[in-house]
Amino acid sequence: MLKGEGVESLAQSFFYAGARSVVASLWKVGDEQTTVFMRAFYGSLRDGKSKSEALREAKLSFIRAGKPVSPRHWAAFILLGDADGGITLAKPDPKSHLVMWALMGALMIGVGAIVLVFRRPLKTLIRRP
């Protein structure tokens, strides 16, 4: 519970970590039903539908299954965050690797310079005792 915010869920942690959207359940749903639901959801995403459309399709697939299915098995799932965008796979930025290697090179040069500058005084300190 956060003052002024209300109840903070686990989904909030995913948003802090950089997730743009989260599919969460409002109550406990059985593993078998969740597996079937998520397969339908991710199948729709793979077909190019937006997250909100994929969630709707997964819920409709439960309703259309032919056998009576209680809403407690499919109505618990909600989409939080960015609902309209489809799935996008993040591509690594090639410049980020260049920056990392440049920083590593600068660090190695700095350490080498420190070793060269203080090499003699350290040797004299070690031999004195």
Image: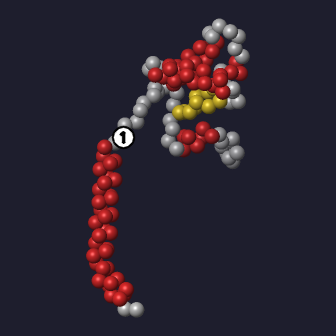
The answer to whether any part of residue 75 appears in the image is: no
- Crowding at label 1, few (<14), some or many (≥20) Cα neighbours within 10 Å? few
Question: Horizontal placement of 86 versus 5: left or right?
Answer: left
The amino acid at mark 1 is Pro
Q: Is residue 24 above or below residue 72?
A: below
Residue 112 point in image, percent of width and height: 29, 70
In which quarter of the view is residue 58 placed? top right
Numbered circles on residues, count:
1
Q: Quadrant of the C terminus?
A: bottom left
Question: Considering depth in this image, is 44 or 123 the residue closer to the camera?
Answer: 123
Q: Helix or strand or loop: what does disc 1 sit on?
A: loop
In the image, what residue occupies the spot 34% across and 42% down? 93
Question: Horizontal placement of 97 versus 20: left or right?
Answer: left
In the image, what residue occupies the spot 33% across and 63% down? 107
The answer to whether any part of residue 32 appears in the image is: yes
- Tell me the residue that label 1 is attached to: 92
Residue most extreme to the bottom: 129
In the image, what residue occupies the spot 31% across and 68% down? 110
Residue 116 point in image, percent of width and height: 27, 76
In which quarter of the view is residue 16 placed? top right
Q: Quadrant of the N terminus?
A: top right
In the image, what residue occupies the spot 61% across and 27% down? 78
Question: Horizontal placement of 99 versus 29: left or right?
Answer: left
Q: Is residue 106 above or below residue 29?
A: below
Residue 72 point in image, percent of width and height: 71, 21
Residue 7 point in image, percent of width and height: 69, 41
In which quarter of the view is residue 5 placed? top right
Check the image and tell me how it is coloured.
secondary structure
